[in-house]
Amino acid sequence: MSSADLTSPRGEMRLNEPLARHTSWRVGGPARRFYRPVDAEDLSVFLGRLDPDEPLLWLGLGSNLLIADQGFAGTVIQTQGCLTGLERRGETGIWAESGTACAKLARFAARLDLVGVEFLAGIPGTMGGALAMNAGAWGGETWPHVRRVRTIDRSGTIRERGAGDFTPGYREVKGPEDEWFLDVELELTPGDGAAGLARMRELLDRRAATQPIGLPSCGSVFRNPPGDHAARLIESLGLKGYRMGGAQVSEKHANFIINTGTATATEIAGLIDYVRNVVEQRTGISLIPEVRRVAGGRP
């Protein structure tokens, strides 16, 4: 590798890239710049050369993002399909880069007879998002399995941090500001991988039976309030099937909002706000969205 390769970004840059192509809701206007790094070192070089005032958005599978119809007036960095390294570390460890699909990691672990992350098979995102949100399902969560992570900041500086540098909560993680997850090392438990794969199939079958799989959505829209379920609250108020334009509360699972084919980000946002307002007015419970809204140049 030449010295030029070490000092110049080597990834793919696209201008005015439609973000609807990269989000699970299939909505969102164009990104002014869209960068796909070759590897972590390339990403470090790219960030080191980026204007420190440039709005920046990280994008994995786009399953928890609602990007405005006018798009994003900054730079989007895509990790899915790029930062996808995945390997075993020692007897009970697995290392994964932030763009690795959660479901892929779950299957990889089971084939190594390592258990504990079967729930990740049902998370429609990447490990970067799972770390940022402490993603969980079916009683499991991401952070109890984290041994260490590497992060990267706006200047391109890469740091290794232990799990103790972060405070995970329900669908959130607090830690050093202005750093993003680059990769993770997980500590898992030796076990019956075949049983783990069978458990994944069982969970995915249950998911397919109860959720609108195959239709454009972001997954669950709201966090479950303490002692209750957002879907139960929404359904109890007769909001299943309620529509705003092309956006609809799923008739299969009330905590999903689907794009019926013509929805705009504005319609989806309006429906989220409407559901929140109705639930709060009628029950006194304020539902907290899991969705991250991106408006213009502001993530």
Image (cartoon, rainbow, N blue to C red):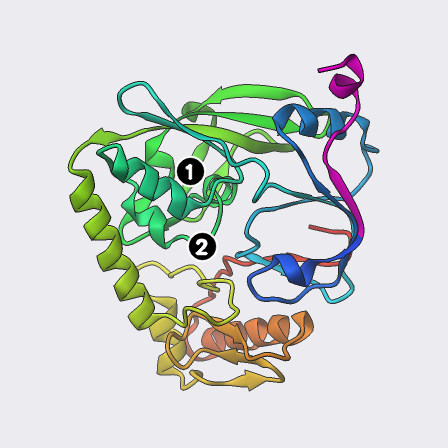
Judged from this view, the residue extending furthest toward the top is 3
- Quadrant in the picture for residue 38: top right
Viewer-proximal residue, 265 or 35?
35
In this rendering, the answer to whether 185 lies above or below 258 is above
Stretch in magenta: 1-15
Query: Residues at badges 1 and 2 in contact (C-beta under 8 Å)?
Result: no
Left or right, residue 13 beside residue 218 = right
Residue 168, label in figure? 1
Q: Is residue 140 magenta?
A: no
Q: Nearer the viewer, mark 1 or mark 2?
A: 2
Give the residue displayed 28% in from the left and 45% down from the top.
118
Give the residue displayed 57% in from the left and 54% down from the top.
62
Viewer-proximal residue, 88 or 75?
88
Amino acid at the residue labelled 1: Pro
Give the residue displayed 39% in from the left and 68% down from the top.
230
In this rendering, the answer to whether 43 lies above or below 118 is above
Viewer-proximal residue, 206 or 265?
206
Give the residue displayed 29% in from the left and 71% down from the top.
209
Q: Which callout, 1 or 2, points at the residue further toward the start of the chain?
A: 2
Cα separation, mark 1 vs mark 2, equals 20 Å
Element carrying mark 1 = strand
- The image position of residue 138, as x and y in percent, is 28, 54
- The image position of residue 99, as x and y in percent, is 53, 40
Label 2: which residue? 124
In this rendering, the answer to whether 280 lies above or below 154 is below
Left or right, residue 183 beside residue 28 = left
Q: Residues within 10 Å of mark 2 (few under 14, many from 20)?
A: many
Q: Residues within 10 Å of mark 1 (few under 14, many from 20)?
A: many
Image quadrant in which the N terminus is located: top right
Left or right, residue 166 beside residue 90 = right
Left or right, residue 242 beside residue 119 = right
